[in-house]
Amino acid sequence: MTEAAPTLPRRARSLTRRIVRVALWAVLGLVVTFAIFFFWASGGDSDDRLVAPGVLGENPKGTKKTEARELKVLTFNIAYGRGPAGDASGPWAESEIRQGLDGIAAQIRDSDADLVFMQEVDLGASRSHDIDEGRFLLEATGLGYSSCVVTWEKNYVPFPYWPPSKHYGAMKSGQCILSRFPIMASTRHRLPQPEANAWWRNRFYLNRAIDHAQLDIGGRPFDVFNVHTEAFDADNRMEHARLLVKLVGETTKNSAGRVLVAGDFNAPPPEASQKKGFVDEPETDFSRDETIAIVRTAGLAEVLPDPAAFTFPADAPSRRLDYIWFGSALERTDAKVLAAPPGPWSDHLPVLARFTLKAP
């Protein structure tokens, strides 16, 4: 006769069921809590339209112009004042960020630029101690007008992933134009996120953009485009270049060549002698990148045709990522990459160009 399998006493069985129920509810609670945090943290965008107005600013004490025969133009990815170290090197003390911004302002003042295109400008982010860097630099450079657009606005960005003390936290960042000339209008054109990214990553990812601003120079409109294309996905970056060419073509039909395009394009020129195997980014490969070749189809001239004019990384430059392009109403008289000052104050070097405005 087979003996029956032993069974737990009734009280033990009841206790086991209660433990299992508590564990299941705890797991469910964690899942719900994570979901709530995920959707809250990845939200916060105050204006998610593809086309939206930029924010215009004025410095009452700044220098202002209405007429010009010459034009000095600077493009500068300022890396929100953190210096040449990578994002994982943070967090940075407020004093370090302010020191970086002071250094950037000094570089801009020393360049005597009339028009400055800036990328990676924090507009009230935890990682840079909620400083509105666009306003800070407008006042610190002594320029008269600004246009800023938001490209990254989240309630909480959990990056770099570990440890949590390095998280960016609340994020509001973008691109700004500083000018001695009145800015009549500014329009942000959002660029698509990488399709190759996982959906959850794109929930936290920035929306890169083109800021199309119209200046008043000599009583006539002058179209300028502040650009920051994709850094980590070549297909997406090339799509950004195609969208830029289309936008420039559509919006400058009657500009009579009064056009400037500048910014961080995150790609070297096709003629670059090195396209991979960089010491600072061994995984980066531009072998099939056609971003700059695509931008060239817009029919604009480039201020630095020399492929050896490097702008990145600032402390040991090995490639060019930053460019200025100009229309037929301008004649280039000089252009150069500015050398890194002590610091340096960004991981990019600025590009400065001087132009003569042709008679209409």
Image: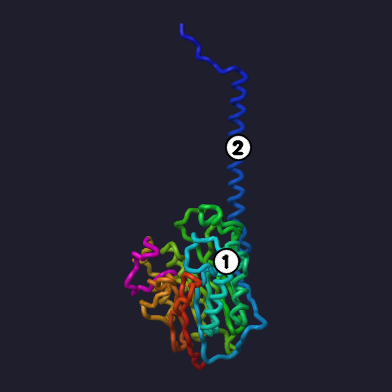
Q: Is residue 271 magenta?
A: yes
**Residue extending furthest right?**
60
Numbered circles on residues, count: 2
Secondary element type, mark 1: strand
Indicate the position of residue 38 as horizontal and vertical percent values: 58, 51
Q: Disc 1 designates what residue? A: 173
**Residue extending furthest left?**
273
Residue at 38% across, 69% down: 290
Secondary element type, mark 2: helix
Indicate the position of residue 288 as horizontal and vertical percent values: 35, 66
Residue 273 can be seen, yes or no:
yes
Could you tell me how far apart the alpha carbons at marks 2 and 1 are, in whole angstroms?
Answer: 37 Å
- What amino acid is labelled 2 in the image? Ala
The coloring applied to the image is rainbow
Type of secondary structure dominating the magenta stretch? loop
Of 268 and 257, nearer the camera is 268
**Residue extending furthest bottom?**
359
Image position of 220 (left or right of 310): right
Report the magenta residues as a range: 266-282
Residue at 43% across, 71% down: 315
Indicate the position of residue 62 as horizontal and vertical percent values: 63, 83
- What amino acid is labelled 1 in the image? Ser
Indicate the position of residue 250 as horizontal and vertical percent values: 51, 76
Q: Disc 2 designates what residue? A: 26
Crowd around label 2: few <14 · some 14–19 · many ≥20 (10 Å): few
